[in-house]
Amino acid sequence: METKKWIVDIDVDKKNSYQQLKEAAHYLQRNEVIAFPTETVYGLGANATSDAAVAKIFAAKGRPSDNPLIVHIAELGQLLEAVEMVSDKAQKLIEAFWPGPLTIIFKKKDGIFSSLVTAGLDTVAIRMPDHPLAIALIRAAGLPIAAPSANCSGKPSPTTAHHVWEDLQGRIAGIVDGGETGVGLESTVLDCTSGEFPIILRPGGITKEAIERVIGKVQLDPAMMNEKQTPKSPGMKYTHYAPNVPMYLMAGNWEKYNELIKQKRQAGLKVGILATAETSKYYDADLVLSCGERNHLHTVAHCLYDTLRDFNKSNVDVIFAETFPKDGVGAAIMNRLEKAAGHRWLESDPRNN
Ligand code: TXA
Ligand code: MG
C-alpha cells in the first residue's frame, strides 16, 4: 500500500493546512487508517464505529486483539452519546484537564463503537487531545477516532512523523505530519468506573498529584509497582518500548558504574548509556546519549522515545539507563523505563552482575 504524507502547518486556519486535513479526514470516513499528531505521541487513527476500519489498526501494528484502544473525540457531545454516565469526579476531571493528556475509562453504551475498540469490555477509554491538528481532523471527519500510538506493537511510541514512517510505511494509508509532539509520553489512563477511588492504570502527562488536587485520593494500579500482578489495563501486560538490545537500569549515583562499564567493554561488549545533559560527561562508554535535563523532567519525557530509537540505530550490545525520582512526570518516565528494561536493575558492584 502506498502511504500518503500530508505536511500540515500547526496553524490549521492556513488555507493549505485545512485542505490537507480535509483530505486526510476523507480517508478516515472511507474507513482507512492514518497516523496523526497529538500532544502526547502520534496516534494511528480509524473510524471507531467501524469493525473494518478498526481491524486495520490491529493489523498494521501487529497489536494483540485483547488490548483495547482509546477513542479520541473533539466535542463533549461525542462523549455523552457514547457513555452510560459521567460521574461527578469524571466531570471535574474533564473540566480541569480536557483537552489534554488524560484518558478516562467510562461504562460504555452498547452499539456505538466497534467491539474491537473495547476488546469485548463493557468500558471504553476516551480522551480529547490537546492538539489543534488532532482536533481539526476529528471534527472534519465527524467521527470518534480510535487511536493507539502509531508504532509497531512493542516499539517505543512515535514522537515524530518520521518515527511513524520508519515503523508503518506501506502498512497504512497516510500520515499527517504536524512536527514533533509535545509531552512525548502517552496520556495518563484513569479508571473512574471502579469502587470508591479512581485508579491510575497508566501514568502519563497528567500527574497523580495534579489529579488528586482536583478529585482527592486516587490509587495506582498495584500491577504498575509489581510486575507479577495482572494489570487492569490490558495493554500494560505486554512488553513495550523495548530497545533491540538488553537494557538495564542503574540506581542513583551513576559514577559508581564506570567500573562495571569498563569490565563489560573489556569483555568485548559495546556499552551504551542513557544519560542526561547534566551527567553524560561522567561516563566512559561506547555511546552516551542524553535524553534531556535531569532538572527538567518534562524534557526527559519529551526526548525519551527518540533516544531509545537512536540506540536501535547504533551498534551497542547493551544499554545501561539512568533512573529518575517517581514524583510528578517522573512516575510516567520510570514506568516506561522499567518496561523498556524488562524490570532489570544493575548492581553497582560488578561482582553481583
Ligand atoms: O497518549 C495516548 O494515550 C496515545 C495517543 C495516540 O492518544 N494513545 C495511546 O494508545 O497510548 P495505546 O493504545 O497505545 O494505549 C491505550 C492504553 C492501553 O494500555 C490499553 O490497554 C488501555 O489504554 N485501555 C484502553 N481501553 C481500556 C479499557 N476499557 N479499560 C482499561 N484499559 C484500557
Ligand atoms: Mg502504545
Image (spheres, rainbow, N blue to C red):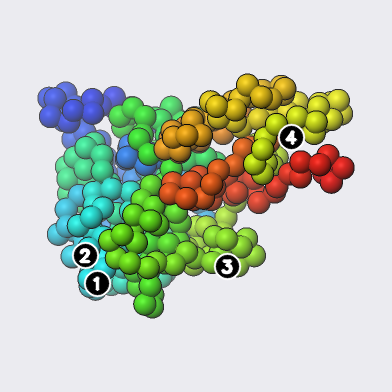
Q: Within the image, what quadrant is residue 211 found in?
A: bottom left
**Pointer 2 local density, CA inside 10 Å: few below 14, some 14–19, many at least 20:** few
Q: Amino acid at mark 3?
A: Thr
Residue at the (76%, 45%) spot, across then down: 347
Residue displayed at 70% across by 47% down: 345
Left or right of residue 311, residue 183 in this image = left
Q: Quadrant of the N terminus?
A: top left
Reading the image, the residue beneath label 1 is 87
Which sits in the foreground, 126 or 326? 326
Task: Give the CA separation, mark 2 to mark 1.
Answer: 6 Å
Point out the image quarter for the C terminus: top right
Point 33% across, 67% down: residue: 216
For the residues labelled 4 and 3, the Cα–Cα distance comes to 35 Å
Coordinates of residue 6 in the picture (x, y in percent): 29, 27
Mark 4 or 1 closer to N-term?
1
- Element type at marker 2? helix
Q: Does residue 337 appear to the left or right of 26 in the view shown?
A: right
The correct choice, above or below, for 49 with respect to 304 in the image is below
Mark 4 or mark 3: whose residue is earlier in sequence: 3
Q: Which of labels 4 and 1 is toward the front?
A: 4
Q: In the drawing, what numbered circle is on residue 230?
A: 3
SS under mark 1: loop
Q: CA distance from mark 3 to mark 2?
A: 29 Å
Amino acid marked by disc 2: Gln
Residue 314 in view, yes or no: no
Q: Which residue, given by chain and number where applicable, does mark 2 sit on? A: 91
Cβ–Cβ under 8 Å for marks 2 and 1: yes
- Residue at label 4? 256
Type of amino acid under label 4: Lys
Instruction: Give the distance between the C-alpha atoms of the residues marked 2 and 4, in whole angstroms.
Output: 49 Å
